[in-house]
Image (cartoon, helix red, strand yellow):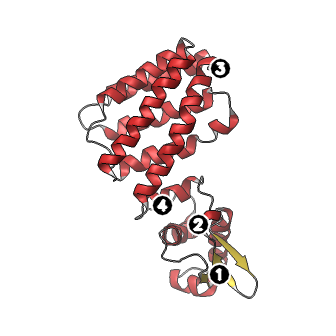
Amino acid sequence: MSTPGRGLHGHVLDTLGPAITAGDYPPGSVLRTDELAQHFEVSRSVMREAVRVLESMHLVESRRRVGVRVRPKAEWNVYDPQVIRWRLAGADRPHQLRSLTVLRSAVEPAAAALAAHHATPEQCAELTACALGMVANSRGHQLAGYLFHDVAFHRVILAASGNEMFARLGDVVAEVLTGRTHHDVMFEDPDPAAVTLHVQVAEAVRTGDANRAEQLTREITVGALHELDVLAP
């Protein structure tokens, strides 16, 4: 499905991007824009716009008299939410989910500890509301509603840390949580213990207990890794 508001070049991206990240065009492959424009039945200007977006993600680079070359995977902007979405949609999903969840386990406990020191009263209230929303949607196969509050919860934790670098990872965490749900790498109902942990994290942040906030959040991320052992080995 194309991202709204991107028109024809969005349609091209939603086909070509996943093909590149899935390895259909291996690193070093040369893509001819004229041939691609003909294949996708779009103008060369539309194709150039799509290539510019792929270049911004460091997936490809344009070379005069050569064409558009697919860059090595090590050079990709793996933090780009769209790149994450494409990779989660492909055969690399288990590795990608694990890589992102390990990132979460390194960052989020520290962010929660900082949030216990720096969260505003408004952020504490929002965190509690998100946790209660997760509770309300945790039974009866309400994964869409649960996901909405889960994403919001983790965004608040990262933002409330007061660290701008952590806060910018909100989109990355949102993509892994969303991808895990949309690709059925979730149980039909969330683990009740994990739901309770989120409520406890919100309370630890509200009361300024940094050590407890960090420990509980670490338990959440460890639990997420264990789920992957079962659902995406």
Q: Secondary structure at mark 2?
A: helix
Task: Please give the residue where the numbered disc 2 appears in the rendered image.
Answer: 73
N-term mark: 1 or 3: 1
Q: Note whether 33 is above or below 221 in the view shown.
A: below
Three-letter residue code for mark 3: His
Neighbour tally class for label 4: few under 14, some 14-19, many 20 plus, Cα within 10 Å: many
Foreground: 194 or 183? Answer: 194
N-term mark: 4 or 3: 4
N-term mark: 1 or 4: 1
- Please say if the residues under marks 1 and 4 sit with CB atoms less than 8 Å apart: no
Three-letter residue code for mark 4: Arg
Task: Please give the residue where the numbered disc 4 appears in the rendered image.
Answer: 87
Percent x, y for residue 101? 47, 44
Q: Closer to the camera: disc 1 or disc 2?
A: 2
Q: Secondary structure at mark 1?
A: helix
- Please say if the residues under marks 1 and 2 sit with CB atoms less than 8 Å apart: no
Q: Closer to the camera: disc 3 or disc 2?
A: 2
